[in-house]
Amino acid sequence: GNGRLLDAAETEAMLPLLRPGYVGGAVFEDGASDIDVHALHQGFLRRFRDCGGTIATGHELLGLSREGAGWRVSTSRGDLRAAILVNAAGAWADEIGRMAGARGVGLVPKRRTAMIVAAPAGVDPGPWPMAVDIDEEFYLKPDAGRLLISPADETPSPPCDAQPEEIDIAICIDRIERAFALSVGRVENKWAGLRSFVADKSPVAGYDADVEGLFWLAGQGGYGIQTSPALGRCAASLVLRKPIPGEIAAQGVTSAALSPARLGATA
């Protein structure tokens, strides 16, 4: 869709929860839509299994080593072997890469906090658009009759099972209450996750320059599920050493722009 400029009155009419006088205007993207993340993810998993893939959870990685022309993957439940090792370990990708003998790509996991709060009594937020602050210091969107809010934090973190920090929750509520006629009495649900970035904030998909058979797929930032259909196709082609699919290449995506080689060597 195309973005169009709205003045203050149009913005307040579209999102009446805004405090009068808070905004001077907005950019509205009428073609934006939600993704059913669960359905998309489950669809990927079904297709993976249909193609003969096996998903083995609960296997703690103990070591990686080259064995002949391939890889030996040592886990807490035994060894696995493969010709190509795809490093799609999210926030842990640099650590896994180093276990494989590679230099890291400079991946920095950053914590993002979100929470669910009630909409004002008697108000249906369903028709409202998602609202993102121009400086991306908060966002608010309808979510099944409630409101999903976030301070849009990007706090560097070691790879971990991220949990929301009380200070980030407080900052979020303060920013939301300053912008919207909303008094948050209770946080119904809260969570945090890690969004991992390399220096140029673009995804990494390509073979390591120094370690044979190691393919990087990392650094999707906060857009992993949104980019997954196209990036997955790109990665599948590049793993097989084929060109990027034509319709994706036509959008300006190149293997060089995705390659870990663009990032140089990191410790």
Image (cartoon, rainbow, N blue to C red):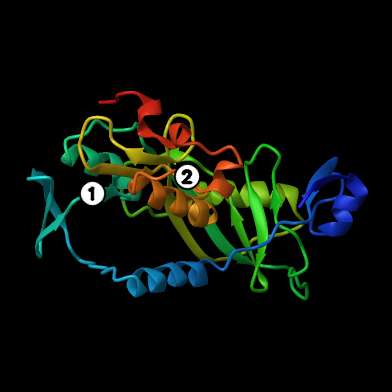
- Residue shown at 40% from the left, 71% from the top: 47
Q: Amino acid under label 2?
A: Ile
Query: In the image, residue 226 lies at what x, y percent?
Result: 55, 55
- Residue shown at 29% from the left, 47% from the top: 87
Query: Residue 206: which disc?
Result: none
Q: Say which of marks 1 and 2 sits in front.
A: 2
In the rendered image of this protein, does residue 38 appear above or below residue 160? below
Name which of mark 1 and mark 2 comes first in the sequence. Answer: 1
Residue in front for this viewpoint, 238 or 129: 238
Pointer 2: what residue? 244
Q: Quadrant of the C terminus?
A: top left
SS type, badge 2: loop
SS type, badge 1: strand
- Residue shown at 74% from the left, 48% from the top: 179
Pointer 1: what residue? 85
Query: In the image, residue 137 lies at what x, y percent?
Result: 62, 41
- Residue shown at 49% from the left, 37% from the top: 202
Residue in front for this viewpoint, 48 or 106: 48
Residue in front for this viewpoint, 223 or 132: 223
Query: In the image, residue 188 lies at what x, y percent?
Result: 54, 68
Question: Is 62 displayed left or right of 134 in the figure?
Answer: left
Question: Is 260 displayed left or right of 214 in the figure?
Answer: right
Query: In the image, residue 101 lies at what x, y percent?
Result: 16, 35
Q: Amino acid under label 1?
A: Leu
Circle 1/circle 2 CB separation < 8 Å: no
In the rendered image of this protein, does residue 264 appear above or below residue 203? above
- Badge 2: residue crowd in 10 Å (few <14, some 14–19, many ≥20): many
